[in-house]
Amino acid sequence: MRRALLAITGLAASTTVLVVLKGAPGAGQAAQDRPVAEAPVAPGGSAAPEPTPGGVTPSARPSASAKPTAKAGASRTPGTRSSATTRSTPAAPRTTTSAPKVTTRTVTGPVVSYRYGSLQVRITLSGSRIVDATGLGLPLDGQSGLRSDDVQARYSGSSGEVVAKQSANLNTVSGATYTSTAYKQSLQAALDKA
């Protein structure tokens, strides 16, 4: 009679545990994602005891009504499964690949002297792509200054012809042939250094 009562009580307790673990929304996935070192939480809110190396979980507090049911010589070894255990599928391995880091660098071409002065070109590259260009030391006064402004407006900046064409093969600015040629020479030297 006692054995039957203990068997029914054990069956009811294991069924309740299975229903609680399987029936709770998201409980199965949360149990799979939990690190091994983290102690599982019992339904009462307290941490459940950790399993011992032999695979047997000691009870947190022995009760007066619980009697040991293990027979001598019958022990559970790691790797064996009882019929009351649930199967969990291993989580897929998580692989993370980070995007290659794009380096931004600035390269300055040499100073090129021409009929109306001298200039040099500085380019900014993101990886191997030109993202900005600017002319340095362009004449500011008189007709030369006006021509320099035309060249700077056409070639330089993040939306200029240098960024659009990604090369020193630029169209010559009308009326500013010498300045355009000097700009292209310094630009080509900067590209060669990059």
Image: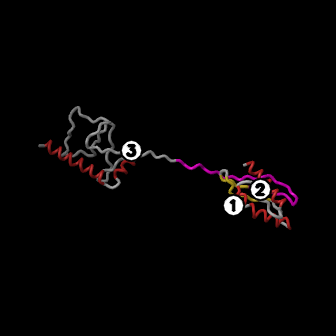
Sequence-wise, the earlier of marks 2 and 3 is 3
Q: Earlier in the sequence, mark 3 or mark 1?
A: 3
Residue 118: give x, y in percent of width and height. 84, 57
Identified by mark 3, the residue type is: Pro
For label 2, the residue is 121
Residue range of the region highlighted in magenta in the rendering: 97-122
- Label 3 close to label 1 by CB (< 8 Å): no
Q: Position of residue 22 (x, y in %)?
A: 30, 51
Which amino acid does the dot numbered 2 rest on?
A: Val
The quadrant of the rendering that contains the N terminus is: top left
Hey, which quadrant is residue 68 in on the image? top left
Name the residue at the top extreme: 73
Front position in the image: 105 or 157: 157
**Are circles 1 and 2 on residues that touch, CB within 8 Å?**
no
Alpha-carbon neighbours of circle 1 within 10 Å: few (<14), some, or many (≥20)? some
Residue 158 numbered tag: 1
Q: Nearer the viewer, residue 77 or 106?
A: 106
Q: How is the image coloured?
A: secondary structure
**For the point 75% across and 51% down, which residue is it?**
190
Disc 3 designates what residue? 90
Residue projecting furthest to the left: 1
Question: x, y (%) of residue 30?
Answer: 37, 51
**Residue 56 lies in the magenta-colored region:** no
